[in-house]
Image (cartoon, grey):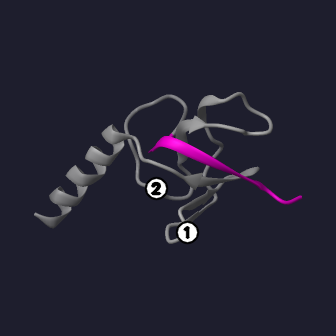
């Protein structure tokens, strides 16, 4: 079965559906964000199944059943990423 590619907007990465803070984009984590035109879900906010693979160059994230094309990032998540980068550089 070929996986459907679905665009996710306003996305961020969390460890589970019980939000306890943001995480790095890596396997085992979950995407959350807004999707349109998903074949099995209503349009709107979703939490994905666990991330299986990340193609940073292509902007794609693969989960068990779907490949997500990363759209614009959640502004709060982007600030979190920038703060982590600054802390690591210091």
User: Looking at the picture, how far across and down is residue 49, in whole percent?
Assistant: 66, 43
Q: Which mark is residue 58?
A: 1
| Displayed quadrant of residue 34 | top right
Residue 3 is covered by the magenta coloring? yes
Q: Position of residue 54 (x, y in %)?
A: 56, 63
Residue depicted at 48% across the width and 43% down the height: 11
The residue nearer to you, when weighing 38 against 86, is 38
Real-space CA distance between mark 1 and mark 2, rounded to the nearest whole angstrom: 14 Å
* Total numbered badges shown on the rendered structure: 2
Compared to 36, does 81 lie above or below? below
Disc number placed over residue 40 in the picture, else none: none
Q: Position of residue 41 (x, y in %)?
A: 74, 32
Report which quarter residue 69 is drawn in: bottom right
Q: How busy is the neighbourhood of tag 1: few (under 14 within 10 Å), some, or many (20 plus)?
A: few
Q: Are marks 1 and 2 in contact (CB under 8 Å)?
A: no
**Which segment did they paint magenta?**
1-15
SS at mark 2? Answer: loop
**Which residue is the site of mark 2?**
25
Q: Under tag 1, what secondary structure?
A: loop
Which residue occupies the extreme left position in the image? Answer: 90
Classed neighbour count for the residue bearing mark 2: other residues with Cα under 10 Å, few (<14), some (14–19), many (≥20): some
Image quadrant containing the N terminus: bottom right
Q: Name the residue furthest right.
A: 1
Q: Is residue 8 magenta?
A: yes
Mark nearer the N terminus (1 vs 2): 2
Tell me the chief SS of the magenta region.
Answer: strand
Residue 14 seen anywhere in this rendered image of the structure: no
């Amino acid at each position: 079965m070929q996986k459907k590619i679905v665009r996710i907007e306003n996305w961020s990465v969390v460890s589970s559906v019980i939000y306890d803070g943001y995480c790095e984009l890596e396997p085992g984590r979950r995407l959350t964000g807004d999707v349109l035109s998903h074949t099995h879900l209503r349009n709107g906010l979703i939490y994905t199944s666990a991330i299986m693979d990340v193609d940073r160059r292509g902007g794609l994230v693969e989960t068990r059943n779907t490949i997500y094309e990363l759209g614009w990032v959640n502004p709060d998540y982007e600030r979190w990423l920038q703060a982590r980068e600054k802390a690591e550089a210091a």
